[in-house]
Image: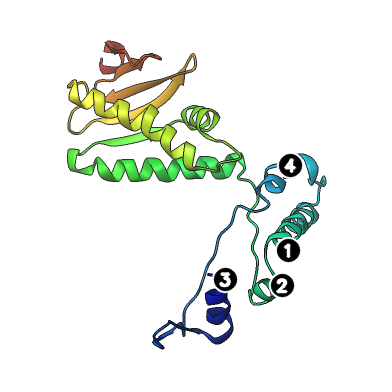
Amino acid sequence: IFNSLLQILEEGRLTDGQGRVVDFKNTVIIMTTNLGSSAIAGGPVGFQVEGNAQTSYERMKGKVDEELKRHFKPEFLNRLDDIIVFPQLNKDELRQIVGLFTKRLSERLLDRDMTVELTDAAKDRLIDIGFDPSLGARPLRRAMQREVEDRLSEQILHGQLNTGDHVKVDVQNGQFTFEHTPRGEKVAIGVGAAGEIAATPDHAASA
């Protein structure tokens, strides 16, 4: 594989065993690796320099470069135009990711004329239970599906969410709550740890 990559990176083409040539002209090749991930995960403790984010990044990148040199041959690394190291995600970036998940969920609910929003508390709770520094944001996506999307589906099946509802996801006592507004009346739906559903009309809100 590396020999094939060397030909592509050096000559911009690949020749197979039968002499056929594949042209890689005007092609951008992006390769990813998790080498050095331990150094990135330890960045806030081991490499953070107060008041100088650039210095912290350079020290972290230096550790990753050392790891790459231990695993790849110089002739391969020398053919790479650039090596980009992505630091560990911070809290604001994780909230933005949850926001993207929420936007995609809202788009899927358009056919029901439903909208959904997550409070900052709900986003932070998802991050707490779904983010693993060693695994990145993938577990966060699964937490969003398990804690929000699946429970919304259950409530739709139970007839507690209807076409035109706006759903607000919040957190109380460490548990997610779902408050929806059908036809001007607020109804709070609490979901316990075992998934039990209880709905309580808020008559004061509709008065």
Label 2 and label 1: CA atoms lie apart by 7 Å
Pointer 2 residue: 74
Say the numbered circle drawn on residue 109. none
Labels 3 and 4: the sequence-earlier one:
3
Label 3 and label 1: CA atoms lie apart by 15 Å
Residue 2 visible at all: yes
Pointer 4 residue: 44
Label 4 and label 1: CA atoms lie apart by 23 Å
Q: Residues within 10 Å of mark 1 (few under 14, many from 20)?
A: few
Pointer 3 residue: 2
Q: Residues within 10 Å of mark 3 (few under 14, many from 20)?
A: few
Residue found 33% across the figure and 32% down from its top: 149
Q: Say which of 131 and 156 sits in front.
A: 131
Q: Position of residue 102 (x, y in %)?
A: 38, 40
Residue type at numbered disc 1:
Lys
* Marks 3, 4: nearer the viewer: 3
Label 4 and label 2: CA atoms lie apart by 30 Å
Residue found 50% across the figure and 44% down from its top: 96
Task: Look at the numbered discs 2 and 1 and tell me whether their residues touch, using CB distance below 8 Å.
Answer: yes
Say the numbered circle drawn on residue 69. 1
Q: Position of residue 29 (x, y in %)?
A: 51, 72
